[in-house]
Every structure is written in C-alpha cells, then in structure tokens.
Amino acid sequence: MTGRRHERSLLGFWFPYDIRGWYHAAESLFGEALEAFDIDSSDEATQIVRAIAAAAQAKFMSVLGDSDSGIAQARLAAETLAPLPDRWAYLRAMEGLCECLTNGGQVEELSTVTNQAIRVAEAGGEDWWAIGMLNYRALVELMQGNIESAAAILEDAEEDPSRPPDYVMEPWRLSIRAMIAAAQGQPDDAVELHGRSIELSRRIGNRQALMVGLQGLGEANAAAGRLDAADVAYLENLSM
C-alpha cells in the first residue's frame, strides 16, 4: 500500500483522537496503519505516512505510561521525516516527541527538540507552530526551576485578542502560566488561569487539557485554603 492519499488522513485522525482522550483506540489504530504500509518501501509518500503513524502511536504509548518506548519510536519517526519534504508532518512528529519527552522527564532533549521545531517552523513561515512550541520552551525553563525565564517566554506568546481563540495551544499556555503562578506563590492567579484553560478546553471537548486544568485547579484551590473547591475539581477530574 502506498501513502500519498493517506498522509492528511492520518494527520487528521491524530487530533480528534488526542483531544477526546481515545488513547487506547488511537494506539491500536496507528499501530494498524504501521502494519499496513511497507517498512522497506522506497516510495517517499509511504515513508512519510509510515513515520506519521509511528509518531502518533508513540505519543499515545507515552500518554498511556510507556514513555521509554514512546520516546524511542517518536525520535525515529522525527529522524525519518527530517530529510523528507512534508514540513507539517515533521513539525507534528517533533511536537509528539516533545510530549513524550515531557512525560518521560527528559528535559535536555526536550529543550533541543523544541528549539529545532521552532527553527523549522520559522524557516517555513509556520508562525502558529513557532508560537505554539514556545509552550514547551517555557515548560523546559519551569522544569529546570527557572520561573522568571518561563514567564518571560510566555509573554512573547500572548494571544492577540483581535484574533479568534486558539483552542489547541492556548489551554496549554494558560495551564503553564498557572503552574508558574503557583510556583511564585500566587494561588489565586493560578486558580484564575486554570479556570480560563478549563473553559477553552470544554468548548471543543479537549479531554487531556481539561484533566490537566482540573488537576491544577484543585491544587491551586488547596494551596489557597479553599478545600471544598479543590475537592470539586479533583472529583471531576477523577470522573473523566
């Protein structure tokens, strides 16, 4: 089976399976896609679509707890796509690798891959990707304890209020800003920021971002002494 007509289909499947939280189904779906395409094919489109499937499956493997396997598979997928012409697929693979590295706590490689993704996005005029990947750059600084640097990075990524909301990247940006506020000892600000992230996530049913937001909201409310509100957030998170 060749891949030309399947490239965009696989990229299209990745997003809804991701935001809806259909992780087990997605791991199986993209695994079947890997098996359907010839690993030894010299067809460029087939190589691209196989690497997309591998990157997607790797991301879901990581979310489901197998970070090491996810990182290794996502890394190989990104390396495969690097010399091939589909820059969008390459950026998607690098973003998936970044999530695997985040889940695995691999901060140094996360920093390297994030910076590479931003360079590729900027070179290709993909401003949305370049700005969105600043979330990971800020997360690296936060994971290294560089709170002020993390905050400064996200100031550069502030959403333009004249544009429609970015329902994909903005919930994560708000959650990271909330984590920064919590690290700065500002639980009330963290509550407000997590609340905004949750609101955006609910609008499109982004289950993963919603769960992260609810967990953070519970922690921020607990830090502020609002234990009943914390319980509400924790219970909703556990019910999902």
Image (spheres, rainbow, N blue to C red):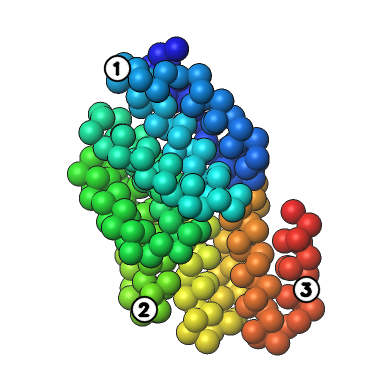
Does residue 5 appear left or right of residue 124 in this picture? right
Q: Where is residue 36 in the image (x, y as percent from the top left)?
A: 50, 19
The amino acid at mark 2 is Asn
Residue 80 appears anywhere in the view: yes
**Is tag 3's residue or tag 2's residue first in the polypeptide sequence?**
2
Instruction: Tell whether label 2 touches label 3 (CB within 8 Å).
Output: no
**In this view of the protein, which residue sits in the foreground, 109 or 212?**
109
**Label 3: which secondary element:** helix
Q: Give neighbour class at mark 1: few <14, some 14-19, many 20+ (Cα, 10 Å).
A: few
197 to 34, vertically: above or below: below
**Is tag 1's residue or tag 3's residue first in the polypeptide sequence?**
1
The amino acid at mark 3 is Asp
Tell me the distance, in whole angstroms, between the alpha carbons under discs 1 and 3: 55 Å
Tell me the distance, in whole angstroms, between the alpha carbons under discs 2 and 1: 46 Å
Q: Depth-wise, is mark 2 or mark 1 nearer the camera?
A: 1
What residue does disc 3 label?
A: 231
**Is tag 2's residue or tag 1's residue first in the polypeptide sequence?**
1
Residue drawn at (53%, 80%), measured in percent from left and top?
182
All told, the count of numbered labels is 3
Q: Where is residue 126 in the image (x, y as percent from the top left)?
A: 29, 43
**Label 1: which secondary element:** loop
Q: Where is residue 211 in the image (x, y as percent from the top left)?
A: 65, 58
Residue drawn at (33%, 68%), measured in percent from left and top?
153
Q: In which quarter of the image is the C terminus?
A: bottom right
Kindly identify which numbered label has been placed on residue 171: none
Residue drawn at (67%, 79%), measured in percent from left and top?
221
Kindly identify which numbered label has been placed on residue 146: 2
Q: In which quarter of the image is the N terminus?
A: top left
What residue does disc 1 label?
A: 42
Q: Depth-wise, is mark 1 or mark 3 nearer the camera?
A: 1
